[in-house]
Image: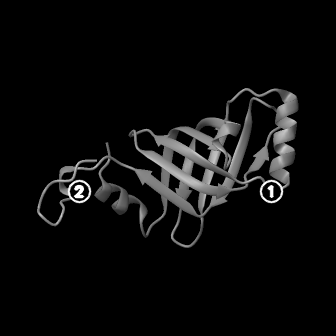
Amino acid sequence: MTSIKEIIDDVLGRGFTIECSSIVLRGRDDSAGMYFSSPGVISGNIAGPFTITVHDSLEKDPGKFIELTNEVSRGLMMCFDAIDYHGNKWTGGWLNPLIEGPSSGRCLLMGNFAQLTADLPLAGFDEFRNSNGQLLRW
């Protein structure tokens, strides 16, 4: 598992690439389920937005795929949940991806987004104490 310090050193103020074993793109409403899912890459640089690239492998009904591509072309916004190859969890949004490839089961998605968060377990030095010095448990 990666520490908070390692994430900060690797990501802030420099270009970076995060290879992910799983990236799931979903809408604002979790009841809609996942739109796309597969391994992919999260990247960024100092001067611009973050970028995501996903090689979708989620099988979809061809009719539903056409509906989804139409919604995307009308501006459907998505967010994503990802797990990198070190087991770190990432969440990002919002993006309106470009979809390349005619297949409902195999397509490439790319998009820019502005927000990225990491969900990391607290390490010993990250423990929080209240004003009486008691350790706070999460």
Q: Report the residue at 16% width, 66% height from top.
A: 131
Residues 25 and 8: in front is 25
Residue 124, numbered circle? none
Q: Which residue is label 1 attached to? A: 75
On screen, 24 above or below 136? Answer: above
Q: Report the residue at 67% width, 30% height from top.
A: 57
Any part of residue 106 in sight: yes
**Does label 1 or label 2 sit earlier along the sequence?**
1
On screen, 63 above or below 29? Answer: above
Image quarter of residue 59: top right
Any part of residue 35 in sight: no
Q: Where is residue 18 in the image (x, y as percent from the top left)?
A: 48, 49
Amino acid type of disc 1?
Gly
Task: State left or right for residue 107 relative to residue 129.
Answer: right
Task: State left or right for residue 93 relative to residue 70.
Answer: left
Q: Where is residue 79 in the image (x, y as percent from the top left)?
A: 62, 51
Among all residues in the image, which is located at the extreme front? Answer: 132
Q: Position of residue 47 (x, y in %)?
A: 56, 73
Amino acid type of disc 2?
Asp
Q: Report the residue at 71% width, 45% height from top.
A: 109
Residue 126, numbered circle? 2
